[in-house]
């Protein structure tokens, strides 16, 4: 997300980057409770706390940014609740969908990028990540067993199959550079189609000119 935001800003696009949970001051507190605190959270309470985070996020950050003409990039959104609390925790899809709709007010992303790797590879990446001294411990979701994460991944891929126009699957087993280029290949046409051709397309032409040696 940082690479994409940086590239878009270089192209003159106003970008807001955020995340769920934790994109607002209230969300930061909820993130601590949900992911980091020692307190055990009941599954229903977890579902509703994620919804509270999202309601605050949408109403105080995401909608105002969109109304101001900015592009919003968020690390996770409503699909995460379908995957983690629905498939992962076992809540009925109808219950989860109703909670999501209440929290978002019906706001849906124009595009969702699903960065996909097999669960075993993802868990190994997590282990490697937490060997770094700046983050020695994982969060509560990362600590769930492989079966939980298999259910989550299957749900995400099912959403992608059901909504291919919105959800694009990106092979995240490739290098950072390859993944970033794939993201640009997906995002750039969307922004151009939404009236940002002069910002995105024009700057891209300049980059191509530079790449060809300035001819």
Image (cartoon, rainbow, N blue to C red):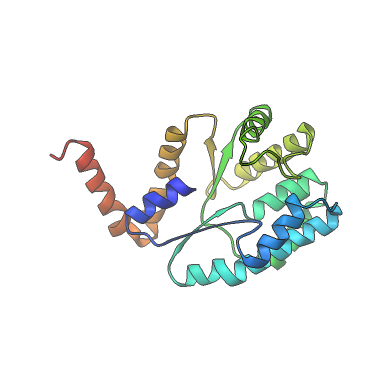
212 and 32: which is toward the camera: 32
Where residue 52 appears, as percent x and y from the top left, is 72, 65
Q: Residue at x 60, y 61 (%)?
A: 23
Q: Above or below — where is 85 with respect to 97?
A: above
Where residue 172 appears, as percent x and y from the top left, is 54, 34
Q: Can residue 86 be seen in this view?
A: yes
118 and 110: which is toward the camera: 118
Q: Can residue 105 be seen in this view?
A: no
Could you tell whether 17 is left or right of 118 in the image? left
Q: Which residue is drawn at 72% across and 50% down?
A: 82
Q: Which residue is drawn at 79% across and 33% down?
A: 147
Q: Above or below — where is 28 with respect to 160?
A: below
Q: Above or below — where is 57 with respect to 121?
A: below
Q: Residue at x 55, y 66 (%)?
A: 62
Please identify the residue farthest to the front as the structure is shown.
Answer: 133
Where residue 210 appears, as percent x and y from the top left, is 21, 41
Where residue 197 appears, as percent x and y from the top left, is 31, 57
Could you tell whether 16 is left or right of 11 in the image? right
């Amino acid at each position: 997300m940082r690479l994409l935001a940086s590239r878009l800003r270089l192209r003159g696009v106003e970008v807001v980057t955020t995340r769920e949970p934790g994109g607002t001051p209230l969300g930061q507190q909820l993130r601590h409770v949900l992911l980091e605190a020692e307190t055990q959270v009941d599954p229903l309470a977890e579902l509703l706390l994620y919804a509270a985070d999202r309601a605050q996020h949408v109403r105080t950050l995401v909608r105002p940014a969109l109304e101001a003409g900015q592009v919003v990039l968020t690390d996770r959104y409503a699909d995460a609740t379908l995957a983690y609390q629905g498939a992962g925790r076992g809540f009925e899809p109808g219950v989860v969908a109703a909670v999501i709709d209440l929290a978002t007010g019906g706001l849906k992303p124009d595009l969702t990028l699903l960065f996909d790797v097999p669960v075993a590879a993802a868990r190994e990446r997590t282990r490697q990540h937490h060997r770094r001294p700046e983050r020695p411990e994982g969060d509560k979701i990362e600590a769930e067993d492989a079966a939980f994460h298999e259910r989550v991944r299957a749900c995400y891929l099912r959403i992608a199959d059901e909504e291919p126009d919105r959800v694009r699957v990106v092979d995240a087993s490739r290098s950072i550079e390859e993944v970033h280029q794939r993201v640009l290949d997906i995002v750039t046409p969307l922004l151009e189609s939404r009236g940002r051709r002069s910002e995105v397309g024009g700057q891209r032409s300049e980059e191509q000119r530079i790449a060809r040696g300035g001819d």
